[in-house]
Amino acid sequence: MRLLLGREDVSPDRPDNDGRAPLWRAAGGGHDRVVELLLGREDVNPDQPDNYDKISLSCAARNGHDGVVKLLLGREGVSTDMPHDGGQTPLSWAGTGMME
């Protein structure tokens, strides 16, 4: 992953056909280390929604990836209460204790 992120011709925030950027995919899959690497880049937008209006934090919370949720919450400016995903917020997807 570091090799790819070091290349000038690779955009770490470019979405696929579903509008899902690498951070969205990594967050949804619970890949803590990849999320950490991507969040270390200023050119990665953690609040970029996919084509279905879902953001990385909502996806991680919905799938129970609390390590990823903590990483995302550690990034300044990450939206926790802006409605996405059919009106749901990342906090509404979180299970009890997930955001503590």
Image (cartoon, rainbow, N blue to C red):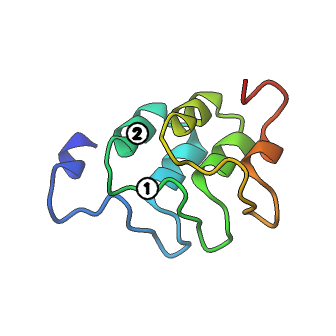
**Element under disc 1:** helix
Instruction: State the CA–CA distance, disc 1 to disc 2.
Output: 9 Å
Q: Quadrant of the N terminus?
A: top left
Task: Classify 91 as above or below 7.
Answer: above
In the drawing, does residue 70 fall left or right of residue 45? right
Dot 1, how many residues are within 10 Å of its Cα: few (below 14), some (14-19), or many (20+)? many
- Name which residue lies at 31% across and 47% down: 41
Q: Are marks 1 and 2 in contact (CB under 8 Å)?
A: yes
Identify residue type, mark 1: Pro
Residue that lies at the very extreme toward the front in this rendered image: 77
Which residue is disc 1 drawn over?
22
Q: Quadrant of the C terminus?
A: top right
- Name which residue lies at 61% across and 74% down: 51
Disc with the residue nearer the chain's start (1 vs 2): 1
- Name which residue lies at 54% across and 39% down: 72
In front: 49, or 74? 74
Identify residue type, mark 2: Val
Dot 2, how many residues are within 10 Å of its Cα: few (below 14), some (14-19), or many (20+)? some
**Element under disc 2:** helix
In the drawing, does residue 67 fall left or right of residue 15? right
Which residue is disc 2 drawn over?
34
